[in-house]
Image (tube, grey):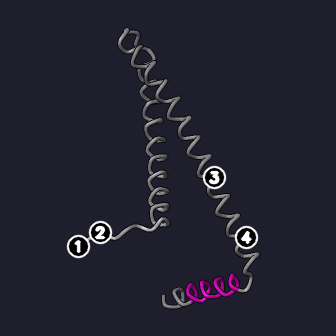
Amino acid sequence: MRPRARSPRTEDQLDAVTKEKLIEDLKVVAQDVEELLKATASQTSERIAAARERAEESLRSARMRWADASDEAAAKARAAAGAAEDYVRDNPWQAIGIAAGVGLLIGLLIGRR
């Protein structure tokens, strides 16, 4: 049995989830490194000093990558919002129909409870 090909939209959604997870993981690692740096601040051994320097550099690098990923995500969100706005402007009656259908479905789901 052949695996089904993923649609580009599904791959984009998986990429978004993966990026979000990566950003969350980077935040956790950054917090852990900061705690480690604080805990070893009084240590003066040469090996610990070298490890602290590497950790600080890694933390700076991770923060820059996180900022880049956040900027990219914000740009994609703005692009998606712009595309949605363009669609609504070009197809107002279809947009109204879609909104009414979604509202009806939500109403039915809420009414079932």
Q: Callout 1, which amino acid?
A: Met
* Magenta highlight range: 94-107
- Element at badge 2? loop
User: Do the residues under discs 2 and 1 have CB atoms within 8 angstroms?
Assistant: yes
Instruction: Point out which mark residue 86 bears.
Output: 4
User: Do the residues under discs 1 and 3 have CB atoms within 8 angstroms?
Assistant: no
Where residue 59 appears, as percent x and y from the top left, is 49, 30
| Residue at the disc numbered 1 | 1
* Separation (CA) of disc 1 from disc 4: 41 Å
Q: Callout 3, which amino acid?
A: Ala
Q: Specify whether residue 26 is painted magenta.
A: no
In this view of the protein, which residue sits in the foreground, 60 or 94? Answer: 94
Where residue 47 appears, as percent x and y from the top left, is 35, 12
Where residue 102 appears, as percent x and y from the top left, is 60, 84
Is label 4 or label 3 in front? 4
| Residue at the disc numbered 3 | 74
Q: Is residue 23 left or right of residue 86?
A: left
Q: Is residue 2 left or right of residue 70?
A: left
State the image quarter where residue 10 is shown: bottom left
Quadrant of the image for the N terminus? bottom left
In this view of the protein, which residue sits in the foreground, 55 or 15? Answer: 15
Is label 4 or label 2 in front? 2
